Image (cartoon, helix red, strand yellow):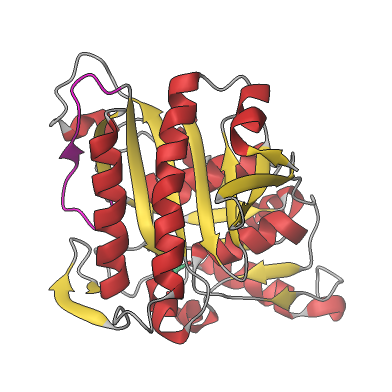
């Protein structure tokens, strides 16, 4: 099994980007350890604070965010960071070549039930002419990501990452403390009989999604003429990992629960990095209107509709919106 740095050099990743990736991974190793010790270290449960999204922060959300932020800002490689847990971007080194967006702990509702959680990250080049304190640096489409990935704190701590030359799986080997490449060029099967959606929102979806899911549920006697299985981990990292491993469609569609907020997932540190990983593995990552990575962002915490996974199934779903 290959170590991380030689694997990245094989993909011609520039040395300064490798150094930044190693910095990010140092933070994930510490988060992995703290997650495993959360019960023993008094890190279960919530703080009394809300983040900018209006969600009550878990203690581990805060710890993971501080860790990630400190290690990145101290590294010297980073011009600014933006995080799910920060109101605005935070300035780093004016000479830093990169900007990093991250969700320090995705799937927070799983923390207290000792279930799957992970860290998602997305790296862009920093525009040279802008001040480090200018949040407009982050208004770059997903197409301009130079690296994206997530670390899943599951039975194994796994890194899934792309630098634009395929999506690769790595596992944290605690004996030497580094990530080892376990699968190069993961491919999402084009067809699937598995879908992931939060069914409890069904009555709030738009008609095309209602019709699509009804046809899946109708099984082999319905219009799709095959049976479908359903899975929902309630952590995007877990659901997307399953899709990368064995195919599937994952969607968080528009819904009418809150008229001012039709979408749930965030573009910069959830949808874009996952789209880069899925597309590099041969899948599709769309909204009902077009490719997610083509969206020109208007703000750091922008939310977006997400329909991604096995190519033929995503196309089948989008057919209902035409
Ligand atoms: O970060 C948002 C998130 O927790 C995702 O990881 C997950 O896919 C989704 O929200 C779960 O949403 P719900 O709680 O509505 O099932
Ligand atoms: Mn999240």
- For the point 51% across and 51% down, the residue is 150
Above-or-below relation of 220 to 94: below
Q: Ligand 1: which quarter?
A: bottom left
- For the point 61% across and 37% down, the residue is 4
Residue 139 spot, x, y in % from top left: 29, 32
Q: What stretch of residues is rendered in magenta?
A: 83-96
- For the point 87% across and 71% down, the residue is 225
Residue 137 spot, x, y in % from top left: 25, 29
Query: For residue 168, which quarter of the picture?
Result: top right
* Residue 261 inside the magenta-drawn segment: no
The N terminus is located in which quarter? top right
- Pick whichever, 76 or 103, lies toward us: 76
Asked if residue 281 can be seen in this view, the reply is yes
- For the point 25% across and 15% down, the residue is 128
* Residue 88 inside the magenta-drawn segment: yes
Is 254 positioned to the left or the right of 183 in the image?
left
């Amino acid at each position: 099994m290959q170590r991380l740095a030689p694997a990245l050099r094989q993909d011609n990743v520039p040395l300064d980007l490798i150094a930044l990736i190693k910095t990010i991974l140092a933070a994930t190793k510490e988060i992995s350890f703290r997650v495993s010790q959360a019960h023993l270290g008094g890190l279960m449960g919530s703080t009394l604070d809300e983040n900018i999204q209006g969600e009550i922060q878990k203690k581990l959300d805060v710890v993971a965010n501080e860790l990630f932020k400190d290690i990145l800002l101290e590294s010297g490689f980073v011009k600014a960071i933006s995080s799910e847990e920060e109101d605005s971007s935070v300035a780093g080194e004016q000479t830093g070549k990169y900007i990093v967006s991250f969700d320090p702990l995705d799937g927070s509702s799983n923390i207290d039930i000792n279930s799957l959680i992970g860290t998602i990250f997305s790296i862009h080049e920093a525009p040279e002419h802008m001040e480090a304190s200018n949040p407009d640096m982050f208004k770059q489409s997903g197409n301009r990501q130079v690296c994206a990935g997530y670390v899943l704190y599951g039975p194994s701590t796994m890194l899934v990452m792309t630098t634009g030359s395929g999506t690769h799986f790595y596992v944290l080997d605690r004996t030497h403390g580094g990530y080892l490449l376990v699968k190069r060029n993961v491919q999402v099967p084009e067809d699937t009989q598995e879908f992931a959606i939060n069914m409890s929102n069904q009555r709030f979806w738009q008609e095309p999604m209602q019709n699509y899911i009804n046809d899946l549920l109708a099984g082999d006697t319905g219009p799709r003429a095959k049976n479908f299985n359903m899975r929902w981990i309630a952590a995007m990292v877990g659901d997307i990992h399953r899709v990368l491993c064995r195919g599937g469609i994952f969607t968080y569609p528009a819904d009418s629960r809150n008229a001012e907020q039709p979408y749930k997932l965030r573009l910069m540190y959830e949808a874009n990095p996952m789209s880069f990983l899925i597309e590099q593995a041969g899948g599709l990552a769309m909204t009902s209107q077009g490719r997610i990575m083509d969206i020109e962002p208007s703000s750091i915490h922008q939310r977006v509709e997400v329909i991604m996974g096995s190519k033929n199934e995503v196309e089948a779903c989008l057919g209902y919106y035409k």
